[in-house]
Amino acid sequence: MIEHRTPAHKKAKELAKYLRGERPNYDYLKSVFRHLRN
């Protein structure tokens, strides 16, 4: 069975669009992605 995933570059653009309004700094983004990994 083939798993269909959104291409990484498209997902990155979606995330950027979502986060842009908050104007996040590096430390905030680092924290967000650390929570995603766990």
Image (cartoon, grey):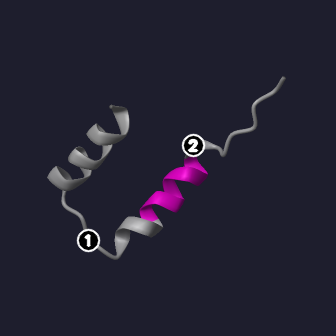
x%, y% of residue 4?
75, 37
Q: Is residue 14 above or below residue 33?
A: below
Please give the range of residues in magenta.
9-16
Q: Quadrant of the N terminus?
A: top right
- Asked where in the image residue 18 lies, by quadrant, the reply is bottom left
The residue that appears at 60% across and 53% down in the rendered structure is 10
Q: Is residue 36 above or below residue 13?
A: above
**Left or right: where 24 falls relative to 17:** left
User: 36 or 30, which lies in front?
Assistant: 36
User: Mark 1 = which residue?
Assistant: 23
Q: CA distance from mark 2 to mark 1?
A: 21 Å
Q: Secondary structure at mark 1?
A: loop
Q: Main secondary structure of the magenta part?
A: helix
Furthest-left residue in this view: 27
Q: Amino acid at mark 1?
A: Arg
Q: Of marks 2 and 1, which one's residue comes earlier in the chain?
A: 2
Q: Residue at x 36, y 70 (%)?
A: 20
As drawn, which residue projects farthest toward the bottom?
Answer: 21
Q: Residue furthest top?
A: 1
Which of the 4 image quadrants contains residue 30?
top left
The answer to if 26 sits in the magenta stretch is: no
Question: Which mark, residue 8?
Answer: 2
